[in-house]
Amino acid sequence: MTDRERIVPAGMEAIVERAGYVPAVKVGATVYCAGQVGRTPDLEVIADPQAQFVACWENLRIVLEAAGCTFEDVVDMTTYHVQMSEHMPVFRAVKDRVFPRGTCAWTAIGVSELARPGLLVEIKCVAVKRDSKAA
C-alpha cells in the first residue's frame, strides 16, 4: 500500500468541505499540489489581476509549506491562464518576484475559463522534498 498523506493547511479546510478535494497529497518525498488560485481564505475570488496572482502564489506557498516543502522543491509546474496574452506580463512579473527562476519544468496553458468566474490563473505543481542532510 502506498504511504499517502493528505495535506490540508490551517485555514484551507473549507476547500475540502466545499469542493471535496485536498490541497495536496504527499506520497513519500513527492508532493502533488492541486491547482491553487487567487482567492481569499473565505474562498472569494480576488478581482484585481495583480493581487489575484500574488494571492495565488501565496496559497501555493502555504500548501507546500504544510507539506514540508518550499518553492525550491518544485520540479514540475503547470499554469492555466484565462486571457493569457493580456495578463501574462503581470503574471510573469509577480512570478519573478516570488518564485525562483529556472528551477523547474514549467508549462503555461491558455484556457477559456477556470472553476469560478473571475479566476485568471491556476497553478498546479509537483514538488520533491529534498533530503535535509543533502541540503
Image: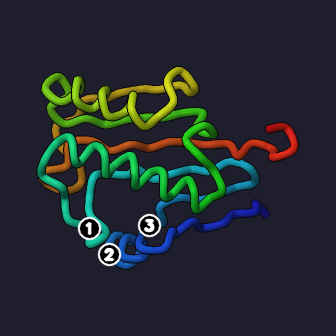
Seen from the viewer's position, the closer of residues 50 and 113 is 50
The disc labelled 2 sits on which kind of residue? Arg
Q: Going by the image, does 96 lie left or right of 43? A: right
State the image quarter where residue 88 is shown. top left
Helix, strand or loop under label 3: loop
Other residues around mark 3 within 10 Å, as few (<14) / some (14–19) / many (≥20): some
Residue 30, image x and y in percent?
Answer: 68, 48
Disc 2/disc 3 C-alpha distance (Å): 9 Å
Q: CA distance from mark 1 to mark 2?
A: 9 Å
List x then y, in percent, for residue 6: 60, 67
The residue carrying mark 1 is 43
User: Label 1 is placed on what type of residue?
Assistant: Leu
Left or right relative to 95: residue 116: left
Residue in view at x 49 percent, y 24 percent: 101
Judging by the rendered image, the residue that carries numbered circle 2 is: 18
Q: Residue at x 18, y 30 (%)?
A: 87
Contact check, label 1 and label 2, Cβ < 8 Å: yes
